[in-house]
Amino acid sequence: MRRAAIALILLGLAAAAPPSFAQAAAAGNGGADPKAPDAFAGASRQDFYNVDERLNAMKDRAGNNRRAASELRSIRSFADQRKARHGGELRDWEREVIAQRLNRVEQMLG
């Protein structure tokens, strides 16, 4: 009887818990709610999907800033590697990582 009660409590807790990242990823959207304004790692929806355009624009802004230029090369390399693995596409979590890294570079550039 006591085991059954504990099992019911654990089952109730599991049902009430928010979905895990793995469950959200299995849903096909990487866990991001496209209607939520902050769903894309602090980047606008357009910046989230236009990774290449954002990288090119920031490369022009970096100019002689060696640290920023180095980070942008690293981000471009990461993006190219991930695209090569997935048929030319980036997954949502990869876009989130890139957006966060680009936000840090923007802060470097002021």
Image (cartoon, helix red, strand yellow):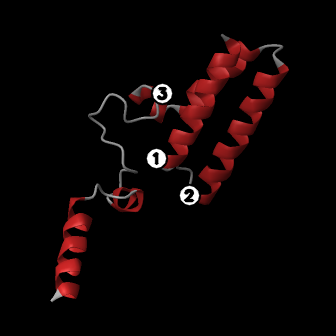
**Quadrant assignment for the N terminus:** bottom left
User: What is the quadrant of residue 61 in the picture?
Assistant: top right
* Marks 2/3: CA–CA distance: 20 Å
**Dot 2 amino acid type:** His
**Residue of label 1:** 92
**Residue of label 3:** 47
**Dot 1 amino acid type:** Asp
Could you say which disc has been placed on residue 4 in the image? none
- Residue 33 horizontal/vertical position (percent): 30, 41
For image coordinates 23% across by 86% down, the residue present is 3
Nearest to viewer (mark 2 / mark 3): 3
In contact (CB < 8 Å): disc 2 and disc 1: no
- Residue 56 horizontal/vertical position (percent): 65, 24
Crowd rating for badge 3 (residues with CA inside 10 Å; few <14, some 14–19, many 20+)? some
Q: Look at the picture and state if 44 lies above or below 49.
A: above
**Quadrant assignment for the C terminus:** top right
**Residue of label 2:** 86
User: What is the quadrant of residue 57 in the picture?
Assistant: top right
Nearest to viewer (mark 2 / mark 1): 1
* Marks 2/1: CA–CA distance: 12 Å
Mark 1 lies on a secondary structure that is: helix
Mark 3 lies on a secondary structure that is: helix
- Residue 63 horizontal/vertical position (percent): 78, 13
* Marks 1/3: CA–CA distance: 12 Å
- Sequence order check, earlier mark of 2 and 3: 3
